[in-house]
Image: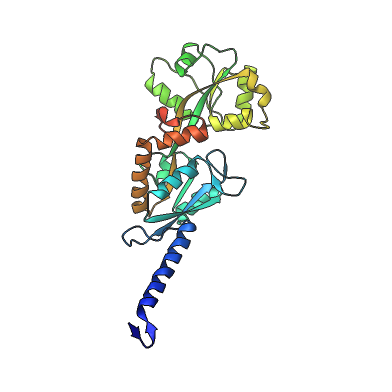
Amino acid sequence: MKRNGVNLKTLSVFALALALVFAAQEAAAGGKADGGGGQQVRKIKYAFTNTIRPLSYLDENGRPAGYDIEVIKLIDERLPQYEIEFVGTTSEDAWLGTDTGKYQLCTTNSFRTAAREEKYLFAKQNSGGGLEYLLLNKKFTDVKSLEDVSDRKLTMVPFRPADAAINVINTYNDNHPDKQIKIDTIDQFENADGVKWVAAGRYDSWVIYESIYKGLVTADAAPLADLEKDLIVIPFTAIATWALINQNETEFRDAYEKVLIDLKNEGKLSELSKQFLGTDVFQFEFVPLN
């Protein structure tokens, strides 16, 4: 059929071909045409700290990489109604931006605290966990647990009051009234000092976050690499880490939460934890924070 000299059949075929070209271009670019059934896709800006290997960082090609990144990628794949945009930044910008709505979601290796619950939404499922080491002087080869620390009456490096690790000992003491570990607090000192004190025998033991220990002792060009021979480390528990979600994003939080729980139940989070962190942090009972 022609109308005003135009072949309508030819025009329809051309329009269909053009639409397919646009769809192919969008798919090649990694975009989402819609959320299924014509549902509008909403963009979610996700901020991540881009300097905390192996959790989130920029690889040699400037692309987001790490454990947290892969978790969010899996979530993005299962939420067709959302398109997650990755923004590498500092922890401070991620926190402030998520609080103010510049970003809807962020991961910064953050613990869940009462103060943060006043500013952000949290899923029911934690996204990861920070492995904790029991750090010992090399002479204590027979010590394998906090119970052994108590039985041997070993001394422990003091904790800063705001340290998450102090909750590990407080939780242990709450659950073991007959096998207490005495701890003290100190306002200011460096993590490197605690490692040095245990290596030198000034204190017998400590609890230290895995990533801090590796950065100080076992990483390439670590400043305290010469002390590794004087230390024993035993991974024994983990502190849950969480994504922070803007307070107004309850609908997104619910969708994110459902997928995250599914990934946990399917063993996907454990697989990624082994791949990027070297161990399955989900095998441990996570220590609650006050």
Does any portion of residue 119 appear in the rendered image? no
User: How many numbered marks are there?
Assistant: 0
The percent coordinates of residue 22 (x first, y second) are 45, 66
The C terminus lies in quadrant = top left
Residue at the extreme left of the image, as rendered: 37
Q: Is residue 55 left or right of residue 20?
A: right
Q: Nearer the viewer, residue 172 or 73?
A: 73
Residue drawn at point x = 55 percent, y = 12 percent? 141
Instruction: From this view, report whether residue 16 is shown above or below residue 90.
Output: below
Residue drawn at point x = 47 percent, y = 15 percent? 150
The percent coordinates of residue 156 (x first, y second) are 54, 20
Q: Nearer the viewer, residue 188 or 7?
A: 7
The N terminus lies in quadrant = bottom left
Instruction: From this view, report whether residue 32 is shown above or below residue 280.
Output: below
Residue drawn at point x = 66 percent, y = 22 percent? 227
The percent coordinates of residue 54 (x first, y second) are 55, 38
Q: Nearer the viewer, residue 261 or 286?
A: 261
Q: Hey, which quadrant is residue 171 in on the image?
A: top left
> How is the protein colored in the picture?
rainbow
Does any portion of residue 143 appear in the rendered image? yes
Residue drawn at point x = 45 percent, y = 43 percent? 71
Instruction: From this view, report whether residue 244 is shown above or below residue 190.
Output: below
Q: Is residue 210 left or right of residue 280?
A: right
The percent coordinates of residue 225 (x first, y second) are 66, 26
